[in-house]
């Protein structure tokens, strides 16, 4: 094992993986190919991506969350160029309409609520003032991103001064996933990734180990590889059809199983946030891009038929339909093994969680980042694989809990679907989080789970989970003192959001910066 | 509507008791919550460890303590890490530094580049890329100037200090902030007949002290958490059989070194902690493999100055309280659990208990959610540290005594085995549940004890060979130059 002193160079090491094959060229496939070709040395490792133009791709979500910035930065992608190429807009959060009850709305923003005061999160002070009847405003008024969303404003955060209120700006993008995929394809091909057009006819496995060895295309070409990344979508040609990794069904927790998507013409300047409107048996999304608006309806087929779902979607559009509706079926859940033998699944081949909190692209990105951290050699150590699988499962479970929160904490009982949601059994972790917040106003983020304390706060508060307690440590400050401090905080946030350029001005500057 | 805690009672005035009193009096609303600390001069305190880890600075800052004043009060010195002698192999030594090795290149941890260079027959010494190690062995120290781009910002430090002087200092702060100190022994603990909650303590002379929340800092005995509430103890001595220690201070014979030394012995290990005025020494051992006389003899032989006091003996069982927080009692310090001070974690676990208590501070309704979360977090923290300590005993080639031979057959937890395998195969490390020790620590100990990574992450191949070697050379130059410009450690306090 290891490199003995006689190894002159790593090139000579027979353990290193030299051939990586990515199967499938949707968002997942090209994100993986781009990142691999950036991180690995093309002279030593070949990266081949097989895709067929005959097989359509599912544009997984067009709305994202802030870690996407890191992915693009890692690849050295210029943000202006990226926004131009993908017709992208800025996203500061998600507006949830009709979730708590019809007519109600709140924004789940990126970034924090106000600032800690003496190490205690600001919302504890807010909870106390509100409970004692002090005028303290809405909690959401303390979020810079909520204020900027409402005002349609955006400014790139200033890294220079970490104490500036503008350092608290957090954002992601809304973009055309098809354009993003093409953009990444160019990037990957420029760095030496090879694209092969074709459909897989046969998968060859090692007779003893079952490891995948080669893919035979319909035209007879054979693509062999040492490590395979399965981005072939729901069917999981390698991870499931070949290796039978298994699928863990979560439709009891999240019963929606269909979606229909349709773009429409844009209506006014794009707003810097996504909208998710609860419907009779699911919810509808609205994602504003530079050139059009993306719309979709996620629903549960046991409670609504396809035609009604389409009707509901079309009735809610605020522009003219631009394409045929694109229907989609799915089963919420995940692959029992995300990584099995020498195959790792990414994207829809890995699992599916509805895009209510825009996590689809993030899960791809995390899968890639985690792959780098556990990068195998030809011995495919089960230790790294097990660690990868355990960590990915944990991440899926915590996102699932966060989604379940939206469906179960609501006053809605107006349809059979919403009444059914009241019967969903929540995980112990979620139970504990809810209990803790109700009793003490506290939120504990566990083990680097994706959603932050602020996200949990936004959605729990927005969904009407009522905290009856707060940190007793806030009692150190008098109500009068805190009234002044909170007022000042709100005022700073209000003025800071007023001082930002409009989202439209920002996009114009992006498009002018060629 | 919340129902605030009005009376906090801390029982026991050792390091844990006064750390808790100082922190609570800083953060609790004084007009509403009274804090009483009961201690008896008749009951001795166990000065838990005099060496610390860098997090202690956060605790002091939180209390608004000035570092210079602190150091002069506690006769403190700076600590840059721990030198481990004879652990992986008799005659070998290595340094476990605070801080980091080198710096990341394009998001890949430094040590993967170091390992790649190692495979190119360059064999760079990992320790040479730690600013802390280089400064420690040069006997130097400097506070960084606040410029985040200065290499000095990478120098991480903790302290060695006299724990009883620290407790006395914190007592002053706490009393100034309104903590009432009662000098007495607790005679009787009164519990609520229904709930079992502790209502009051009867002390000498028949007086009672009542409270809403009790903090048990009574040491191993656990007057409230164990004697009254029977929380139970999870015994970990199968993994860590050391159960005794003997401590002797000795005269200082040289300028204090800015690091602790931990030397493996026949059935345990000895510590050497340099203070401004004297040197602290001790021997932690397993009584099933050696006896008190032999252990004391070993310790005396290794002192490098004249003994300043009679040997003090200490008995313990490694393990943790099954519930750190039960009903209205929170155990902090030795009443919460004991892990040998091999990695100087005792004071840190006190600090950690206090910080978590503040973050989850209850009101008089005592929500079970807070208690459960507190117990979950503390159990996890203790378990991760335990695993890290066990690592020192099993990543070794020593087989010269029965004690060491028995270590080889230890049945270790799966979590630890997985961590070791990942690190050893290719330098991978993943930190779980905000565990205390980072990749630097695991790498330092495993590499130092002959179980270093055999391979590196292929992402380190991105750099050309020239660039790789140049980066490594540059880093060493920066470290060497920085250390050369630093003043002697003894000039720093």
Image: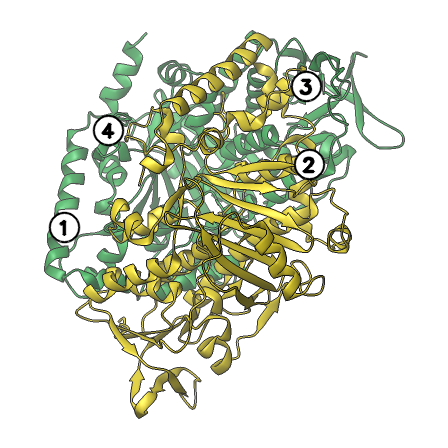
Chain colours: A green, B yellow
Residue of label 2: B451
Give the label on residue A161, or none: 4
Dots 3 and 2 on the same chain: yes
Q: In front: B91, or A380?
A: B91
Circle 1: element type: helix
Is residue B397 visible in the rendered image? The answer is yes
Q: Quadrant of residue A144?
A: top left
Q: Chain of mark 4?
A: A
Residue occupying the point 46% across, 34% down: B136
Q: Is residue A491 above or below residue A464?
A: above
Q: Contact, CB < 8 Å: mark 4 with mark 2?
A: no
Badges 1 and 2: C-beta atoms under 8 Å apart? no
**A396 lies left or right of A505:** right
> For the residues marked 4 and 1, what is the alpha-carbon distance in whole angstroms?
22 Å
Measured in 3D between alpha carbons, the distance from the residue under mark 1 to the one under mark 2, in whole angstroms, is 55 Å
Q: CA distance from mark 1 to mark 3?
A: 59 Å
Return the mark for residue B119. Answer: 3
Q: Is residue B238 above or below residue B180?
A: above
């Amino acid at each position: 094992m290891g490199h003995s002193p006689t190894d002159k160079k790593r090139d000579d090491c027979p353990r290193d993986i030299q051939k990586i094959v990515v199967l499938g060229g949707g968002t997942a496939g090209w994100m993986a190919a781009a990142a691999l070709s950036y991180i690995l040395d093309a002279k030593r490792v070949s990266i081949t991506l097989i895709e067929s133009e005959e097989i359509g791709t599912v544009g997984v979500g067009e709305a994202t969350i802030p870690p996407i910035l890191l992915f693009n930065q890692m690849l050295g992608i210029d943000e202006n160029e990226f926004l131009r190429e993908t017709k992208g807009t800025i996203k500061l959060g998600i507006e949830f309409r009709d979730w708590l009850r019809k007519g109600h709305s709140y924004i789940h923003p990126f970034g924090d609520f106000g600032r800690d005061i003496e190490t205690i999160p600001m919302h504890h002070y807010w909870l106390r003032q509100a409970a004692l009847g002090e005028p303290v405003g809405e909690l959401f008024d303390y979020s810079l991103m909520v204020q900027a969303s409402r005002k349609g404003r955006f400014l790139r955060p200033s890294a220079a001064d970490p104490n500036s209120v503008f350092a608290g700006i957090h954002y992601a993008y809304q973009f055309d996933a098809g354009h993003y995929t093409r953009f990444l394809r160019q990037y990957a091909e420029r760095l030496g990734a090879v694209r092969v057009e074709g459909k897989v006819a046969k998968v060859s496995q090692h007779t003893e180990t079952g490891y995948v060895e080669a893919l035979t295309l319909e035209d007879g070409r054979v693509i062999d590889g040492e490590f395979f990344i399965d981005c072939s979508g729901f069917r999981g040609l390698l991870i499931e059809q070949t290796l039978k990794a298994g699928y863990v069904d979560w439709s009891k927790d999240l019963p929606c199983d269909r979606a229909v998507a349709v773009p429409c013409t844009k209506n006014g300047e794009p707003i810097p946030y996504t909208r998710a409107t609860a419907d009779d048996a699911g919810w509808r999304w609205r994602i504003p891009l530079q050139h059009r608006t993306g719309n979709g309806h996620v629903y549960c087929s046991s409670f609504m038929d396809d035609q009604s779902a389409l009707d509901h979607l079309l009735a809610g559009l605020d522009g003219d339909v631009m394409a045929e509706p694109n229907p989609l079926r799915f089963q919420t859940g995940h692959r029992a093994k995300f990584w099995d033998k020498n195959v790792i699944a990414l994207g829809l081949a890995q699992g599916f969680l509805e895009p209510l909190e825009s996590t689809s692209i993030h899960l791809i990105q995390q899968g890639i980042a985690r792959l780098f951290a556990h990068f195998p050699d030809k011995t495919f150590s089960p230790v790294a694989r097990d660690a990868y699988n355990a960590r990915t499962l944990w991440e899926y479970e915590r996102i699932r809990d966060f989604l379940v929160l939206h469906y179960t904490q609501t006053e809605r009982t107006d349809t059979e679907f919403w009444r059914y949601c009241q019967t969903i059994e929540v995980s112990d972790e979620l139970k504990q989080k809810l209990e803790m917040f109700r009793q003490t106003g506290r939120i504990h983020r566990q083990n680097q789970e994706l959603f932050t304390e602020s996200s949990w706060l936004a959605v729990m508060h927005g969904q009407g989970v009522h905290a009856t307690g707060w940190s007793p440590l806030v009692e150190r400050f008098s109500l009068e003192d805190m009234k002044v401090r909170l007022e000042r905080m709100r005022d700073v946030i209000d003025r800071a959001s007023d001082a930002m350029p409009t989202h439209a001005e920002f996009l114009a500057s992006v498009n002018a910066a060629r | 509507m919340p129902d605030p805690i009005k009376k906090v009672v801390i029982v026991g005035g050792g390091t844990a008791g006064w750390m808790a009193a100082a922190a609570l009096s800083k953060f609790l609303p004084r007009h509403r919550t009274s804090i009483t600390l009961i201690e008896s001069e008749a009951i001795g305190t166990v000065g838990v460890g005099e060496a610390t880890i860098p997090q202690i600075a956060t605790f002091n800052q939180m209390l608004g303590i000035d570092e210079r004043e602190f150091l002069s009060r506690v006769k403190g010195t700076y600590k840059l890490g721990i030198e481990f002698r004879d652990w992986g192999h008799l005659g070998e030594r290595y340094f476990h530094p605070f801080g980091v090795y080198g710096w990341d290149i394009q998001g890949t941890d430094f040590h993967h580049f170091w390992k790649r260079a190692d495979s190119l027959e360059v064999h760079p010494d990992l320790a040479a890329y730690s600013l802390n190690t280089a400064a420690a062995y040069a006997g130097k120290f400097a506070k960084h100037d606040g410029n985040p781009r200065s290499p000095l910002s990478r120098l991480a430090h903790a302290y060695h200090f006299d724990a009883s002087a620290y407790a006395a200092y914190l007592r002053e702060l706490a009393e100034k902030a309104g903590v009432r100190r009662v000098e007495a022994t607790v005679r009787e603990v009164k519990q609520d007949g229904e709930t079992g909650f502790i209502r009051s303590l009867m002390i000498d002379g028949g007086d009672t002290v009542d409270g809403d929340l009790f903090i048990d800092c009574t040491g191993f005995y656990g007057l409230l958490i164990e004697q009254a509430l029977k929380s139970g103890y999870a015994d970990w001595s199968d993994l860590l059989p050391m159960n005794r220690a003997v401590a002797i201070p000795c005269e200082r014979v040289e300028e204090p070194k800015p690091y602790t030394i931990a030397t493996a012995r026949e059935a345990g290990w000895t510590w050497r902690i340099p203070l401004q005025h004297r040197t602290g020494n001790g021997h932690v051992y397993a009584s099933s493999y050696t006896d008190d006389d032999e252990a004391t003899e070993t310790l005396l032989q290794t002192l490098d100055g004249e003994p300043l006091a009679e040997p003090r003996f200490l008995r313990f069982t490694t393990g943790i309280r099954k519930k750190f927080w039960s009903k209205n009692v929170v155990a902090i310090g030795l009443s919460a659990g004991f892990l040998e001070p091999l990695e100087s974690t005792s004071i840190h676990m006190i600090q950690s208990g206090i910080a978590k208590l503040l973050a989850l501070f209850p009101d008089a309704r005592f929500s079970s959610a807070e208690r459960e979360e507190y117990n979950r977090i503390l159990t996890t923290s203790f378990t991760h540290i335990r695993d890290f300590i066990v690592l020192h005993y099993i990543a070794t080639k020593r087989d010269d005594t029965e004690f060491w031979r028995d270590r080889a057959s230890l049945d270790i937890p799966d979590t630890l085995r997985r961590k070791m395998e990942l690190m050893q195969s290719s330098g991978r490390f993943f930190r779980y549940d905000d565990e205390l020790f980072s990749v630097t620590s695991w790498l330092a100990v495993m590499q130092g004890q002959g179980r270093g990574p055999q391979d590196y992450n292929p992402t380190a191949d991105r750099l050309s060979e020239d660039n790789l070697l140049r980066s490594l050379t540059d880093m060493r130059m920066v470290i060497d130059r920085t250390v050369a410009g630093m003043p002697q450690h003894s000039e720093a306090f």
